Amino acid sequence: MLDTAPASCVDGGDPALCAADVARGVTRMLLRHDLVAILEVPLDNGRRADMMAIDARGGIVIVEIKVSRADLMGDGKWPDYLGHADRYFWAVPAGFDLSPLESPAFLPERTGIIVADRYDAAIVRQAHTQALAAPVRKRCTLAFARRAARRITALTDPEALALPLG
């Protein structure tokens, strides 16, 4: 973990590039802690998590990336993600105003905070673990594995995904 917060992309630039930088830094940090992550993960409730990671024991983490206050304050769908993970983190770039994440509306007793740049990340507030029920964990883990395998297939043989099932 970093001793100091990484450099900021909050002060300017393209929000999509800033979000990609945050995702890259968070992915690196998660890998150091033996969690493997994939981006843009559809959930079975119709929502889409920015990142989902799984540790060696099957613990599931969802990370939601926010690079602007407007994006954070306008996002009312994030509570729908809590039922798909043992731990939930907000990931933001350095320089991001963390004060809204301390308000009761953002469940600081449950959610963690990660500050990241394109090279690394630091957990500044640990997420509380709320263990998933076994059937939910199995469903989420299987969906994660199948999505990851499908993405690898698309990289190695893009035409294969167009083949009919069965």
Image (tube, rainbow, N blue to C red):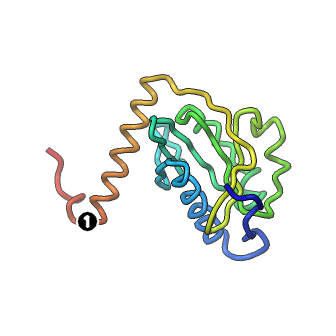
> What residue is shown at x 83% (from left), y 57% (from top)?
97
Q: In the picture shown, does residue 157 fall above or below 56?
A: below
- Could you say which quadrant of the image residue 2 lies in? bottom right
Spot occupied by residue 28 in the image (x, y as percentages of width and height): 55, 60
Relative height, residue 45 to residue 37 (above, below): above
Residue, x 68% and y 61% (percent of image)?
116
Report which residue position mark 1 lands on: 156
Q: Where residue 147 appears, x then y in whole percent? A: 36, 49
Q: How many marks?
A: 1
Dot 1 amino acid type: Thr
* Secondary structure under the numbered disc 1 in the rendered image: helix
| Residue at the image point whose x is 45% and y is 35% from the top | 58
Q: Does residue 149 appear to the left or right of 8 in the view shown?
A: left
Q: What x and y, as percent, mark residue 141?
A: 41, 37
- Foreground: 75 or 130? 130
Q: Position of residue 140 (x, y in %)?
A: 43, 36
Quarter of the rendering occupied by the C terminus: top left
